[in-house]
Amino acid sequence: MSVYGAAKIGCTKSGVWIQISNAARSVILSDVARHRVALKCDYLREVTTRLDKQISKQSISDQMRRVRSWKTTPELTVRRLLRKNGIRFSGRNTNLPGKPDITLREPKVAVFVDGDFWHGRQWSTRGHASIEAQFNGSKTSNYWVQKIRRNMDRDCKATTDLVKDGWRVIRLWESDIHKNPEKCIRTIMQAADLPSTYDEFAHVAEKTCAEFFAGIGLMRLGLEKAGWSVRFANDIDEQKFEIYRSNFDCSDGHFVRGDVHNLTSDEVPTVALATASFPCNDLSLAGSRQGLQGAQSSAFWGFVDVLKKLGSRRPPIVLLENVTGFLSSHGGRDFSEAMLALNRLNYTVDPFILDAAWFVPQSRQRLFIVGVSKAFQSAGPAETQQFYESRVRPKALADFILRHPEIDWNIRKLPIPPRTSVLLADIVEDLPTDSSAWWSASRAEYLLNQMSPKHRSIADLLMARKAWSYGTVFRRVRNGKSMAELRTDGIAGCLRTPRGGSGRQILFKAGNGKYFVRLLTARECARLMGANDFVVDFPLNQALFGFGDAVCVPVIEWVAKYYLNPLVGELIRSRVLGGSPSSARTSVAA
Ligand SMILES: C[S@@+](CC[C@H](N)C(=O)[O-])C[C@H]1O[C@@H](n2cnc3c(N)ncnc32)[C@H](O)[C@@H]1O
């Protein structure tokens, strides 16, 4: 409205001002009666919003001004103790990546004193499950969360750059200096005479990954969205590799196609993380239930062998992904054996379950396990059912954890994931009615007749509506008869590989007295996996095999953002990183 467009409202420390142009004033004067109340309300609302913004901006900049970024109390403590121990050092070096607070020129040691708030530790020490939770309810939440995440990324980048340049890097938390300054000084002194050996944490800051059982590369896609980079990938399947290489540049030879059992340690570079979404065929309820000894799922042991072969170059973090049936396979024996195998490789383990339906309109529950080198292990919380049980660790999993004290668990508090509002209808392709993808009337009718009376009546209801509705259908054999099962809750069923002809998911579109039937397209499958822009120009079956076996991209991104990245932030603290040519190595190990 012109009145509001011509009026300016603002505020200073001393009060609120309203500036009204002549044009605006004349409108106000000519139409006072009609506008008076509305204007007052709108002005007040706008003034309050402006004041709020101004206050929050002011409080942010006030806080920022009050916080010193260098020569802080903990930093002065470190300096004093270094002097006391006869260590010569220089102050802040603004020419080096990240501007280390203290440097020892010979040997090259760079020390950072990181504030808990600014560098992303305070939320966890205060018992929150995420950075977001720390600012819950605050108007400036977004600002702080983004700022802290940027700082965390910068910390990793500066650390990586320094390590590559031959520096030994030590990042100290200010709270650790408060708690135990002598221990921090010992770490710095240790860095001064550390022999040139491989340091298993040197690469963590670089957030590099080796992707086993890479399939079409959706694990990679999710990790990359959270700042990780893939240095190595392996899969046995030629057709999946064809899809992978159409989506990711493989000219550097990082993708080694072949059986995981035949990999040698030389082929696998030194990385921070190894991921393994190993075959589920023998673990899923639909499969043979041969477990980890089955022809397919035994590939897990091939992965374990690679980790063994890597010896001291073993990645400090591993991430496993599989169906939730893994938990119950062979009465839980398979899962506990797998966890104990990781324990023997010096990893503590932490399982949790995520459903893709929280992120995309596809029901896809999967079990994840993060293994972390025991060289890094935070003090575990009290072992109580209340602690373990949550949406990401439902009762069956929490019970399993408590029933297996022989397994070295290290359970991390995780935030409750979001619930997406995106529905199946939002991701379907709008194919013209004469598209060859739609089934013929007789074939569609055959499917309709395969529905149980209950599902048929739901289909009829959808047809009777004046708007289009969408559902999905799977064919299943019930009591020896092939039945069409209709799902209409706005979520697609779990995408499966089309083995034996029953794995293809069917789209049912109904409304205005009509109905249409076709298979889900490759693009729709990509969207259901959160890989919206994926190159999918392949025969439908090849694409369905790829997506049916894959991980859901936003789920992996969530794991990286809320688990792996904060973990990296902890792993790079309070230890000596890098400093030898071998630890700076990122290419294939010699
Ligand atoms: C569950 S899928 C993982 C899919 C992948 N995460 C993705 O997003 O596409 C398991 C993969 O393991 C591969 N695989 C099975 N046996 C293997 C073996 N012995 N060595 C290497 N890869 C194998 C399959 O080809 C399949 O792509």
Image (tube, helix red, strand yellow):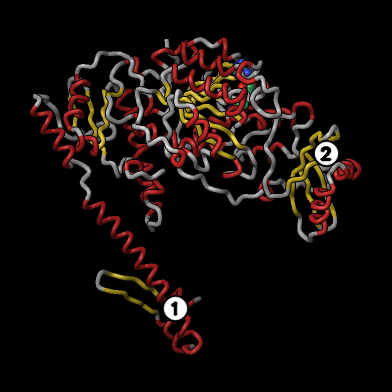
First reached walking from the N terminus: tag 2 or tag 1: 1
Crowding near the residue tagged with mark 2, few <14, some 14–19, many ≥20 C-alpha atoms within 10 Å: some
Q: Is residue 216 visible?
A: no
Q: Position of residue 514 (x, y in %)?
A: 85, 54
Q: Position of residue 284 (x, y in %)?
A: 66, 28
Q: Is residue 504 positioned above or below 510 on the image?
A: above
Does residue 78 appear left or right of residue 456 in this picture?
left
Q: Is residue 326 visible?
A: yes
Does residue 402 appear left or right of residue 154 in this picture?
right
Residue 315 image-quadrant placement: top left
Q: Mark 1: which amino acid?
A: Cys
Which residue bears the numbered disc 2? Answer: 483
Location of the C terminus (image quadrant): top left
Residue 375 image-quadrant placement: top left
Q: Are marks 2 and 1 in contact (CB under 8 Å)?
A: no
Which of labels 2 and 1 is toward the front? 2
Crowding near the residue tagged with mark 1, few <14, some 14–19, many ≥20 C-alpha atoms within 10 Å: few
Disc 2 element:
strand
**Gap in Å between the C-alphas at discs 2 and 1?**
61 Å
Which residue is most to the right?
Answer: 442
Q: Is residue 529 positioned above or below 49 on the image?
A: above
Q: Position of residue 353 (x, y in %)?
A: 54, 36
Q: Which residue is rendered at x = 38% and y = 57% of the image?
A: 138
Looking at the picture, tell me which residue is in the foreground, 90 or 3.
Answer: 90
- Picture disc at residue 25: none
Q: Mark 2: which amino acid?
A: Met
Q: Which residue is rendered at x = 42% and y = 84% of the image?
A: 25
Which residue is most to the front?
Answer: 403
Which residue bears the numbered disc 1? Answer: 41
